[in-house]
Image (cartoon, rainbow, N blue to C red):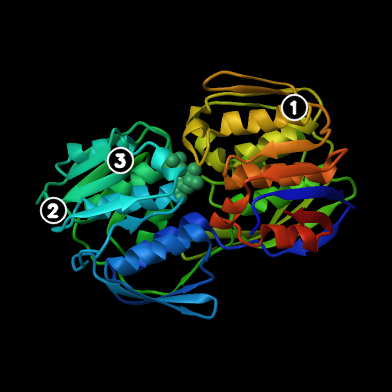
Amino acid sequence: MARNIIINGSDSFDFQVEIPADKSITHRAIIIASMCEGEIKLLNPLLADDCLSTIEVMRQLGAEIKEEGTNLIIHGRNYNNFIQPRGKLNAGNSGTLMRLISGILSMQNFTSEIFGDESLMNRPMNRISSPLAEIGCNLKTLDGKPPIKFYPSNTKKSFQYDNVLPSAQVKSCMIFAAIYLEGESIVKEKFITRDHTERLLTYLEYPIKTIGKNIHIMGQGRINAKEIKIPNDFSSAAFFIVAALIKKNSKLFMKDINFNERRTGIAKVLQKMGAKITVENKRYEANELIVDITSEYSVLSAVDVSGENISDLIDEFPILFIVCAVCKGVSNIDNIEELRYKESDRINSMEKGLNTLGIKTESTKTSIKIHGGEFNGGIVDSFGDHRVAMAFAIAALISKKPITILNTQNISTSFPNFIDLLMEIGVEVYES
Ligand code: S3P
């Protein structure tokens, strides 16, 4: 994919769009299938760059992973039989991979090292290295950032860990570590975050249970091999949900979307703003809720968002900022410091682009105020952040003049066919 894209708006549209598979669940399914003993078929995995990095890392640890059409066949190695990778492990752009796999690499009787791309090398890893060190693991970061080096430690004692950060990656890292230990470990969450790891392990009959905000993991249990069907990604759907909401006379329908309550906070916020979003055909697959979604043009008003449930929409703030920028009134969004530690500092990346397009904002370290207005068009930088790039691409549908978005190559980390889908619904896109 080219680095820069120019988007010249679109006519109104009324279509069904095929949203790609869920990234968070695909990462976990590849890792967990590699930890079981036996063969697991993953139906509908996301084969985007981030998940390809996960496949490569698990292969280097000894799992056999084959692509069969659009499915993956994984021969698990049993989590006790991983082998020492020949070289350094490369997590690419994926913070989820680096943090989740750290719980496993910390428990091996061999040394290993993991690194990533320029963006990942600047992201905080002390959030996982500190708790892992606290429970007896032997690992080193570079001043709290990657690369991470892992050394054998022989720790076997179960633990209780209070996760005070609103982070599913930290929680999942500690769950994976707990699998290697003797007896029951407990991870206590201050903020309840996405629970895909717990759901998938439960589906594969691993002894794990959630009681209130505490996750109880019995160590050294068995992960059973079963087919896993991966639903489509609500975070990717969110871009098209918003496209229909802000484009006059438009409507989009999306099928088989994961509707995990800890992921769908933006739907509640948008409905509060006046959005017509219909959720139908609820059913469960591999212990996850799946739905079909229709979204249509709506007159929206400003909103205030803050508090405990921020992590329910943590990845959707870039696209929510776009909505706030074109609805009537001033929106106040608070308690969002975590956005500063994503693939880019998302408060900064979004604020810079919004200002360029003619939208007034005011921000602090933890908040942003967005004054509703109109997009004038212009050149914005995505700072190599896939969700920032996609958010501005959707903004361009209603911009008075074209929007050029720089550094969009990382869209392929989560949504490889994003531009194709935009063109399918009639958006004029040029690559340069
Ligand atoms: C993810 C958790 C979130 C999210 C990220 C994916 C996951 O990160 O932003 O895109 O799959 O566990 P944090 O755990 O850092 O909040």
Q: Are marks 3 and 2 in contact (CB under 8 Å)?
A: no
Q: Position of residue 251 (x, y in %)?
A: 82, 54
Label 3 sits on what residue type?
Ile
Q: Is residue 48 left or right of residue 134?
A: right
Residue type of the residue flagged with mark 2? Glu
Mark 3 — residue? Answer: 128
The earlier-in-sequence mark between 3 and 1 is 3
Residue occupied by mark 1: 302
For numbered disc 2, what is the local secondary structure?
A: loop
Q: Which mark is residue 336?
A: none
Residue at 80%, 34% in the rendered image: 300
- Please, what secondary structure does the residue beneath circle 3 have? helix
- Marks 2 and 1, Cα distance to the nearest angstrom? 51 Å
The local crowd at label 1, few if under 14, some if 14 to 19, many if 20 or more residues have their Cα within 10 Å, is many
Residue in view at x 60 percent, y 57 percent:
415
**Does residue 218 appear anywhere in the picture?**
no
The answer to whether mark 1 is within 8 Å of ligand 1 is: no
Within 10 Å of the Cα at label 2, are there few (<14), some (14-19), or many (20+) other Cα atoms? some
Q: Which of the two marks, 3 or 1, is nearer to us in this view?
A: 3
- Residue 110 appears left or right of 230: left
Q: Earlier in the sequence, mark 2 or mark 1?
A: 2
Distance from the alpha carbon under mark 3 to that under mark 1: 36 Å
Relative horizontal placement of residue 77, taking residue 376 as reference (left or right)? left
Q: Residue at x 35, y 42 (%)?
A: 170
Quick check: is the Cβ at mark 2 less than 8 Å away from ligand 1?
no
Looking at the image, residue 188 lies above or below residue 81: above
Q: Which residue is mark 2?
A: 182
| Residue at (71, 42) in percent of width and height | 392
Q: Earlier in the sequence, mark 3 or mark 2?
A: 3
Q: Return the x and y of residue 46 as percentages of the image width and height.
A: 53, 64
The amino acid on which the numbered mark 1 sits, given as a three-letter code, is: Ala
Local SS, label 1: loop
